[in-house]
Image (tube, helix red, strand yellow):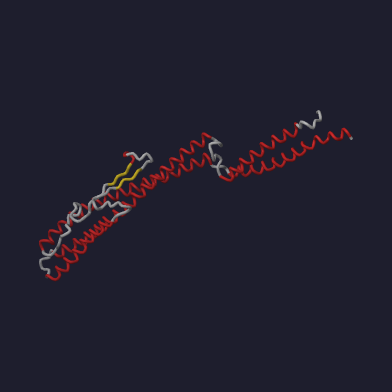
Amino acid sequence: MAFSINTNAEALSALRTLTGTNAELAETQARINTGLDVASAQDNAAVFAIAQRLRADVAGLSAVQGSLDNAQSALDVGLAAAEAASDLLIELQELAVSAADQGLDSASRDSLNDNFGQLRDQISSIVNTAEFNGTNVVNGDDSISAITDPTATAANTITITGADLSLGGGVITVSAAATISDVADAASQVANIETSLDNLNEVLSRFGAGSSRLELQAEFTRTLSDSIEIGIGNLVDADLADASADLQALQVQQQLGLSALSIANSAPSAVLSLFG
């Protein structure tokens, strides 16, 4: 092999090897720092594109989850109001039946009527305040609608129709001015309350079924979102155990490369011995 001080082939080869090792070492350190094997399109364009599309799906499902949670909360408030109204109707029925007794004295009837009026008005208070985030499903004005898919099309929407539980509003046939001040009024209110309870039970059944459906859809959405997240991780997450082993091996290779380059760089100095 010829001696030359202008061209050191061994040093160039050692430098190329060391440069490659340094590049691999930087890539491995980036995987460890980010926890990602594919952190950008530069790492793997196809996999990164797939992961980004899946991340968009997860973001859409997050919006779906928010819609379902909002609908569930609004319906829970309406359901609580309907149950409270049902309990009050049962109490009103007891008072009306008692007031229908012809042998009842006037003082007792007046007391029952006063109590009846307070409980009757309480139904109105409950119905008017049963609102969540601007939605009231028991005053006859609002219904609940929740998206079940990021496309948000009508076919992928759960809609639960509200009910009018105001006094005399249709479901509850007891009017806002209803009294049990005499036997005839009391008997009339007993019939109204029985009808109201039957109507309200239908509303409770519908609200309960709607609540169950929203809960099932929310659970499915959470499961689907988690599954996609796991899939994204399988595509782009780095195997840190493997990266750690690679890091140690590359650090050794780097040290050896530096030593090889140092030896190669010192080789031309051997030419001096030819002129000693």
Quadrant in which the C terminus is drawn: top right
The front one of 6 and 71 is 6
* Spot occupied by residue 78 in the image (x, y as percentages of width and height): 29, 53
Residue farthest along the right direction in this orientation: 276
Residue 177, quarter of the rendered image = bottom left
Residue at the spot 55% in from the left edge and 36% down from the top edge: 42
Residue at the spot 27% in from the left edge and 48% down from the top edge: 143
* Spot occupied by residue 209 in the image (x, y as percentages of width and height): 30, 48
**Up-down: is 23 above or below 94?**
above
The front one of 196 and 55 is 55
Residue farthest along the front direction in this orientation: 6
Whether residue 118 sits left or right of residue 13 in the image: it is: left
Whether residue 134 sits left or right of residue 227 in the image: it is: left
Whether residue 45 sits left or right of residue 176 in the image: it is: right
**Up-down: is 210 above or below 177?**
above
* Spot occupied by residue 106 in the image (x, y as percentages of width and height): 12, 70
Quadrant in which the N terminus is drawn: top right
Whether residue 66 sits left or right of residue 189 in the image: it is: right
Q: How many marks can you see?
A: 0
Residue farthest along the top direction in this orientation: 2
* Spot occupied by residue 262 in the image (x, y as percentages of width and height): 76, 39
The front one of 42 and 91 is 42
